């Protein structure tokens, strides 16, 4: 009885070990800090939100589009409480007010709000909520808009960049609202747009624009000169945000229901003494992370992510879901390395894991066989009878086993030996089949589809 108890305990330990080993890669640090949701016009709830902006102290300004207002979420990321206790209404107007884009001018402590239905934008003082001035009208010239969508602020000088979506262009204004320039036209060539939406500015002088209906994200300089396209396939990129401290670009795709995190590097040519030479931006082909769509829990999965904002001082990333009426706050420093399932690294990890498990089970078998012979001695109907000497060589037992009839196994070594031998040969056949099909499918998994293959690295200068 005692040996049996020890055996059962060891078997339970092995099962537990296998389970823990399978869960090692599933254990992740906390990415999601807090989320809020709402469907009414009461404080603390929102309807069809579209965009957000984060102040340096962590305060969140949200475009509560369905309720025709801007709300403020004042909370502590380290010790957050219920949203209803921390929410105020910053700006609320009639049903014609349709805020879809928002950004903060940190230097002037002002909010810039895009009003899509009114075809204009507002510049509002944060300290005096009703102190807003409206700029723009419906039309096609300067100071005119045709359903503008989003806004970004140049941190260097406070310039305002607005996507004039149905005019297929980006308009640029100074911080006081004076028109400076516009660029873009409808088309599919580089530097052309088809319904541009989200945009953001990298402090080194790069502008990212979500070219939604062209299913791409373009990188331009601040004068509108095209630099490169992000080497990634999208369905409907709707918003972008630079995390310049960690050198990442986050891209929201409302159809793919995900946020893609791309890493980049900024380099300056130091071979010359010309300090005015433009810096270079380089994006990696493989994203650092893709999250939202493939979350394990449906409560943390996106439906229609529509806006994103980051703030390095508060270490926050905010994602807005328009259909779920939900707002997520994430830890910006969290990275889960994205890996393709056909990656050779995954194969090596699986191979090493299985070899370790095989060694553990083999060692356990040899240990048990030596200590508790009663459980491993052959149980046969007759005395063990070897008509000839044991086969020589490592593989000699295979043809010898094939020569034996099932009746002989049962008589001399017992039924359990017959089952074991049959099982062993079945495993060998399965391994052979997997090897054959693996060799056939290896080129497909290794190379993948050939369309739209980007170069190893994409690099351009600001020009």
Image (cartoon, grey):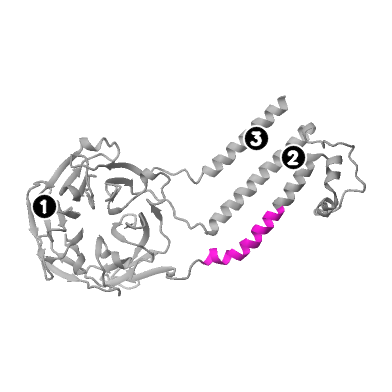
Contact, mark 2 vs mark 1 (Cβ under 8 Å): no
User: Looking at the rendering, which quadrant does residue 347 occupy?
Assistant: bottom right
For the point 58% across and 64% down, the residue is 442
Left or right of 181 in this view: 338: right
Report the residue marked by disc 3: 11
Task: Please provide the residue range marked out in magenta.
Answer: 428-447
User: Does 14 sit above or below residue 285?
Assistant: above
- Label located before the other in sequence (2 or 1): 1
For the point 33% across and 46% down, the residue is 330
How many neighbours does mark 1 have within 10 angstroms: few (below 14), some (14-19), or many (20 or more)? many
Q: How far separated are the C-alphas under marks 2 and 3?
A: 14 Å
Residue sitting at the far right: 387
- Residue 421 versus residue 453: which sits nearer the camera? 421
Label 1, secondary structure: give it. strand
Q: How far separated are the C-alphas under marks 3 and 1?
A: 68 Å
Q: How far separated are the C-alphas under marks 2 and 1?
A: 78 Å
- Residue 366 versus residue 404: which sits nearer the camera? 404
Query: Can you give x and y, in whole percent of width and height, for residue 400 in the image?
Result: 85, 52
- Residue 462 versus residue 80: which sits nearer the camera? 80
- Residue 253 versus residue 19: which sits nearer the camera? 253
Report the residue marked by disc 1: 124
For the point 72% across and 28% down, the residue is 3
Residue 31 shows up from this direction:
no
User: Looking at the rendering, which quadrant does residue 281 occupy?
Assistant: bottom left
Label 2, secondary structure: give it. helix
Left or right of 454 in this view: 162: left
Report the residue marked by disc 2: 366
Q: Which mark is residue 369?
A: none
């Amino acid at each position: 009885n005692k040996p049996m108890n020890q055996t059962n305990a060891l078997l339970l330990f092995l099962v537990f070990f296998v389970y823990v080993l399978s869960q090692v890669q599933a254990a992740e640090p906390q990415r999601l800090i807090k989320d809020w949701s709402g469907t009414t016009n009461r404080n603390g709830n929102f309807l069809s939100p579209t965009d957000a902006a984060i102040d340096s102290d962590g305060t969140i300004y949200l475009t509560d589009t369905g309720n025709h207002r801007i709300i403020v979420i004042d909370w502590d990321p380290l010790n957050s409480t219920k949203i209803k206790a921390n929410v105020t209404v910053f700006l609320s107007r009639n049903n014609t007010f349709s805020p879809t884009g928002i950004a903060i001018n940190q230097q002037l402590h002002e909010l810039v709000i895009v009003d899509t239905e009114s075809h204009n934008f507002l510049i509002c003082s944060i300290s005096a909520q009703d102190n807003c001035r409206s700029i723009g009208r419906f039309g096609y010239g300067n100071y005119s808009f045709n359903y503008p969508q989003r806004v970004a602020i140049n941190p260097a000088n406070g310039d305002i960049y607005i996507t004039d979506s149905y005019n297929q262009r980006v308009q640029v204004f100074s911080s006081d609202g004076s028109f400076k320039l516009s660029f873009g036209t409808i088309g599919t060539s580089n530097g052309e747009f088809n319904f541009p939406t989200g945009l953001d500015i990298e402090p080194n002088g790069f502008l990212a624009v979500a070219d939604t209906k062209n299913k791409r994200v373009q990188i331009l300089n601040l004068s509108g000169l095209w630099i490169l396209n992000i080497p990634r396939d999208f369905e409907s990129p709707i918003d972008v945000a630079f995390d310049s401290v960690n050198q990442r670009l986050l891209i929201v795709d409302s159809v793919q229901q995900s946020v893609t995190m791309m890493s980049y590097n900024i380099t300056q040519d130091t071979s010359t003494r010309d300090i005015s030479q433009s810096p270079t931006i380089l994006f990696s082909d493989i994203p650092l992370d893709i999250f939202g769509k493939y979350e394990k829990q449906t409560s943390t999965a996106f439906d229609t992510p529509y806006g994103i904002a980051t703030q390095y001082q508060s270490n926050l990333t905010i994602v807005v879901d328009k259909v779920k009426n939900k707002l997520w706050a994430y830890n910006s420093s969290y990275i889960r390395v994205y890996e393709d399932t056909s990656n050779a690294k995954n194969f090596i990890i699986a191979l090493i894991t299985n070899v370790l498990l095989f060694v553990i089970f083999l060692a356990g078998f040899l240990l048990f066989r030596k200590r508790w012979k009663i459980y491993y001695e052959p149980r046969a109907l007759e005395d063990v009878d070897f008509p000839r000497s044991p086969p020589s060589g490592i593989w000699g037992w295979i043809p010898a086993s094939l020569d034996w009839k099932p009746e002989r196994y049962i008589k001399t070594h017992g039924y359990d030996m017959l089952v074991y031998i049959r099982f062993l040969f079945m495993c060998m056949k399965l391994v052979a089949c997997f090897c054959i099909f693996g060799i056939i499918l290896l080129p497909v998994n290794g190379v993948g589809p050939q369309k739209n293959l980007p170069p190893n690295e994409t690099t351009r200068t600001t020009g």
